Amino acid sequence: MRLDHIGIAVRSIAEARGFYEQGLGLTSEPEIEVVAGEKVRVLKLTVPPGSHIELLEPMDEDSAIGKYIAKRGEGLHHLCYAVDDVLKATKLMQESGYTPIWDQPHVGAGGCLVNFFHPRETHGVLTEISQGPN
């Protein structure tokens, strides 16, 4: 398991990306990805040597990110850890007493299979586990 990415909720990718690209000198992917099932637009910014930041812009105020921003404002949304097998990792976490947000993993950004664990059980940090696409 390794830190894969940090998710940052933003009202506007267009407004936020300057800080990360010009201010921090990070390189972004050429395209903004739409994750229709989550009603979110995602811009990935590379953080060497092997992780990234995802800027998460809601497409709808009723989306999870839209509701998050309405309640808490912009900022850190989640930490994501890469795993080889998201089903196995979910099961192991459940056996350790942690409850996934979804019964079954969903397809997330980049075609990864993902699941989340609620901050109530993870000491205040929304935690994602992610298996890369085949």
Image (spheres, rainbow, N blue to C red):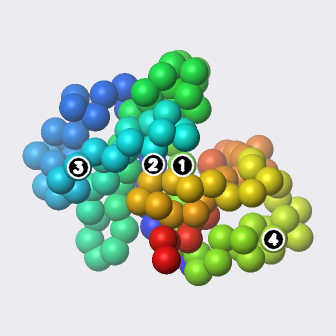
Residue 35 can be seen in this image: yes
Q: Secondary structure at mark 1?
A: strand
Q: Residue at x 22, y 56 (%)?
A: 29
- At mark 2, the secondary structure is strand
Mark 2 or mark 3, whichever is nearer to me: 3
Dot 2 or dot 1: first in sequence order is 2
Residue in the foreground of this view, choosing between 41 and 75: 41
The part of the image, by quadrant, that contains residue 25 is bottom left
Instruction: Classify mark 4: helix, strand or loop.
Output: helix
Q: Quadrant of residue 122?
A: bottom right
Distance from label 1 to label 3 (Cα)?
22 Å
Which residue is denoted by mark 1 in the rendering?
A: 78
Residue on which disc 3 sits: 31
Q: Earlier in the sequence, mark 1 or mark 3?
A: 3
Residue type at mark 4 is Lys
Residue 91 circle label: 4
State how far apart marks 2 and 1 are (Cα). Answer: 5 Å
Q: Residue at x 46, y 67 (%)?
A: 4
Give me the residue at 81% from left, 71% from top: 91
Q: Mark 4 and mark 2 in contact (Cβ < 8 Å)?
A: no
Is disc 1 in contact with disc 3, using a CB cutoff of under 8 Å? no
| Marks 2 and 1 in Cβ contact (< 8 Å) | yes
Seen in the image, is 65 located left or right of residue 119? Answer: left
Kind of residue sitting beneath label 2? Gly
> Quadrant location of the N terminus?
bottom right
Q: Is residue 77 above or below residue 113?
A: above
Residue 7 numbered tag: 2
Is the residue marked by circle 4 packed among few (<14), some (14-19), or many (20+) residues within 10 Å? some
Q: Alpha-carbon distance for marks 2 and 3? A: 17 Å
How far is mark 4 from mark 1, CA to CA? 20 Å
**Residue 5 appears at what percent x and percent y?**
43, 60
